[in-house]
Image (cartoon, rainbow, N blue to C red):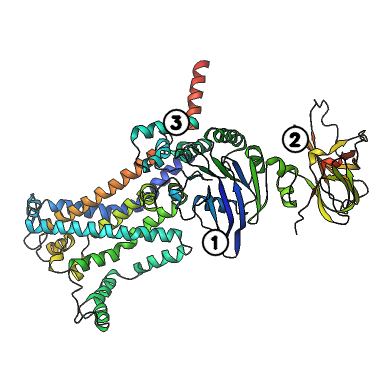
């Protein structure tokens, strides 16, 4: 099995007035685990169905290794799909479900048996070969779907929210297995999901989509740490995000130290950026909750451009390994609450040390914040 | 002292009570007449109709007759052919209805003809098909033919009208099963290398089997016993079993023979119904999980109680 490079070239698809895909272009590398991530209705499933051959674009085309695949019917494409609802054939046993593509090819019984056994081992279904799908659990059904999609040795595997019907624990296990299978078969995986944690944990690269457009393509690290738009920043993980205006910009080590005015917080914030920014230009400032330190005493750090604010804990949420704190800055009753995550790395004999209505200091360095350049209209 | 009944016992008793009116109805108007027919088929024929109470196999012996054999054979092929035609038309119609936005309207349109008496609908066909009828006058007007074609009083017109009359009985069960069918399965089949036709034959048909067998029985049984259609739009060589029965009762006055022919219809229907029940049972058994959580828990419980004894 060998993966192909999948190129989506300026694809547009409308349903009446609704633009499901609006001039979407993306190149997915050979053998890559690529995720299409976005809320429901963002066009990710439509794009997958176009690649699979169940839907056709109004404009644009799709290439597998520079070959236009739009004229090829779905049964002749080098792609196979794992459907959200599994789409196992209820009248066939697990064995016959997996053998289905081989039977269509009129392959000999011995060869079919050999291949089925091989893929059944890959997904660990040896004990359930002669059961009907209705007798399997959700996770087992998913494994059958995986084996059935892989047995044809496709060049591209398309996964349409394959884990969304499973419970959280099982989802984690299957995700690790999928990653493992991807390493073993080495073909291109295109994974559609609305769950950002799934996408972050397995993908080589992610395309974040909204309203039929791709907003950002990048590695999980790039998407999380350097979101291109406000939407991406808010959709991936949790964050604090505020509109801001540049007050000053000076060189700082290899980067630039920028002071921005945040009207909603009624204060100024220091943040670094790789490029100089013009005074007066408007951006979104974002800082992830886990990067903010929350302490009862003033911070002792003397890092350049350290941001320190005094505030009151309005709502503490304890969740075992961490606590979430929603903090209101002093003297500012209308300001949005700032979200802070604190990891509990030591044994807490008397519960969390910071509690409701405690006076606290919030601090983060200029490097921890990030300026989102592409301000959504 | 009155003994209080447990809720379960009470319900069982009430259930038996409630089933009485239905039971009496079926006994008086269904089981008893059927028993009479069975009985009559083994009696000697009366001179002016009716029977003489004397056991004989005469009626069944009379059935072994080349002219009756021809009618039986004709009834079989006309019924089979019409039924298959009905199903072939009903599958795409059911498919289109299941996919349509206007399901309720389409269902309504299919049910509307039932509001008109079947005789009137047959006469409507006569006025369409007859030599001076609607169809021929249109053809003549268009200059396609010089004089009226013989479109009626032959086996073709019998099949046409039978298909028209019983098509809804094929469409309705097929529509219901196709409507429940998961169309993603067709996508999955295409994705795995099946052509459009292969996906329908290998994935859709096996999953709408219950609808197909119901449609077959719902159309085959009434067509097999059809009597008015061959009588009104059939020709000399369109006689079916139903017509023989009527003739034997009203003209030849051979009631035992009429009963014996009725038995053929009844047996054919019974075979169909049993086949349907058997296939439904097989389907249910195949989908029943062998291992259930309760069974497992009971096993565990039994195991523990043994240890503590």
The residue at 79%/30% (across/down) is A344
Residue at numbered disc 3 = A118
Q: Residue at x 31, y 52 (%)?
A: B24
Q: Is residue B108 visible?
A: yes
Give the mark nearest the N terminus, 3 or 1: 1
Circle 1 — which element? loop
Please tell me which of labels 1 and 2 falls first in the chain: 1
Please state which of residues B31 and A352 is positioned toward the viewer in this rendering. Answer: A352
Q: Position of residue B128 (x, y in %)?
A: 26, 76
Report the residue at 13% width, 64% height from top.
B247
Which residue: 61% across, 53% down? A25
Horizontally, is B43 left or right of A124 in the view?
Answer: left
Disc 1 sits on a residue from what chain? A
Relative to B26, say whether A174 is above or below: above
Residue A310 in the image, given as x and y percentages of width and height = 92, 42
- Nearer to us: label 1 or label 2: 1
Callout 3–callout 1 Cβ contact below 8 Å? no
Binning the other alpha carbons within 10 Å of mark 3 as few (below 14), some (14 to 19) or many (20 upward) gives some
Regarding mark 3 in the picture, which secondary structure is present there? helix
User: Residue A58 — which label?
Assistant: 1
Viewer-closest of B124 and B12: B124
Locate residue A181 relative to residue B41 in the image: left or right: right
Q: Which residue is mark 2?
A: A319
């Amino acid at each position: 099995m060998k993966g192909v490079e999948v190129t989506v070239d300026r694809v547009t698809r409308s349903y009446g007035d609704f633009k499901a895909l609006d001039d979407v272009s993306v190149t997915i590398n050979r053998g890559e685990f690529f995720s299409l991530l976005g809320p429901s209705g963002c066009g990710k499933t439509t794009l997958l169905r176009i690649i699979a051959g169940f839907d056709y674009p109004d404009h644009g085309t799709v290439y597998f290794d520079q070959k236009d695949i739009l004229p090829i019917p779905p049964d002749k494409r080098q792609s196979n799909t794992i459907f959200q609802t599994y789409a196992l054939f209820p009248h066939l046993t697990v064995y016959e479900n997996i053998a289905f593509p081989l039977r269509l090819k009129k392959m000999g019984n011995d060869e079919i048996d050999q291949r089925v056994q091989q893929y059944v081992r890959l997904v660990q279904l040896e004990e359930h070969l002669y059961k009907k799908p209705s007798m399997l659990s959700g996770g087992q059904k998913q494994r059958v779907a995986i084996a059935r999609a892989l047995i044809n040795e496709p060049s591209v595997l398309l996964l349409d929210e394959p884990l969304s019907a499973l419970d959280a624990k099982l989802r984690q296990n299957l995700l690790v297995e999928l990653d493992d299978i991807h390493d073993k078969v080495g073909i291109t995986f295109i994974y559609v999901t609305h769950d950002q944690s799934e996408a972050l944990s397995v993908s080589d690269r992610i395309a974040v989509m909204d309203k039929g457009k791709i907003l950002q393509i990048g590695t999980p690290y790039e998407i999380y740490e350097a979101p291109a738009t406000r939407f991406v920043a808010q959709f991936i993980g949790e964050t604090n995000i505020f509109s801001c205006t540049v007050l000053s910009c000076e060189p700082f080590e290899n980067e630039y130290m920028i002071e921005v005015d945040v009207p909603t917080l009624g204060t100024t914030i220091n943040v670094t950026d790789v490029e100089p920014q013009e005074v007066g230009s408007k951006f979104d400032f974002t800082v992830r909750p886990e990067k903010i330190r929350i302490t009862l005493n003033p911070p002792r750090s003397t890092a350049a451009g350290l941001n320190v604010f005094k505030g009151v804990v309005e709502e503490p949420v304890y969740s075992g390994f961490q606590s979430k704190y929603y903090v209101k800055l002093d003297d500012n009753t209308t300001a949005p609450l700032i979200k802070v995550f604190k990891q509990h790395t030591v044994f807490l004999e008397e519960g969390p040390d910071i509690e409701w209505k405690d006076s606290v200091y919030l601090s983060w360095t200029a490097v921890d914040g990030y300026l989102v350049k592409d301000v959504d209209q | 002292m009155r003994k209080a009944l447990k809720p379960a016992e009470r319900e069982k008793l009430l259930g038996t009570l409630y089933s009485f009116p239905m039971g009496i109805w079926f006994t008086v108007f269904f089981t008893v007449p059927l028993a009479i027919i069975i009985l009559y088929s083994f009696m000697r024929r009366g001179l002016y109709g009716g029977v003489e109470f004397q056991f004989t196999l005469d009626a069944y012996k009379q059935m072994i007759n080349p002219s009756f054999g021809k009618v039986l054979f004709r009834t079989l092929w006309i019924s089979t052919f019409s039924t298959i035609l009905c199903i072939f038309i009903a599958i795409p119609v059911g498919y289109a209805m299941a996919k349509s936005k206007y399901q309720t309207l389409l269902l309504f349109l299919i049910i509307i003809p039932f509001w008109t008496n079947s005789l009137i609908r047959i006469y409507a066909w006569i006025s369409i098909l007859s030599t001076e009828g609607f169809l021929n006058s249109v053809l003549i007007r268009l200059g396609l033919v010089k004089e009226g074609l013989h479109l009626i009083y032959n086996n073709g017109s019998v099949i046409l009208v039978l298909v028209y009359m019983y098509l809804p009985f094929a469409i309705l069960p097929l529509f219901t099963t196709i409507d429940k069918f998961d169309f993603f399965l067709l996508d999955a089949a295409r994705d795995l290398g099946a052509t459009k036709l292969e996906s329908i034959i290998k994935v859709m048909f096996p999953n709408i089997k219950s609808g197909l067998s119901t449609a077959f029985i719902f159309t085959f049984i009434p067509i097999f016993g059809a009597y008015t259609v061959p009588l009104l739009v059939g020709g000399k060589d369109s006689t079916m079993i139903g017509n023989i029965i009527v003739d034997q009762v009203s003209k030849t006055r051979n009631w035992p023979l009429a009963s014996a022919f009725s038995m053929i219809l009844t047996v054919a229907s019974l075979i169909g119904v049993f086949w349907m029940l058997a296939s439904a049972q097989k389907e249910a058994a195949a989908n029943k999980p062998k291992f259930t959580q309760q069974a497992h828990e009971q096993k565990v419980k039994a195991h523990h109680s043994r240890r503590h004894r």
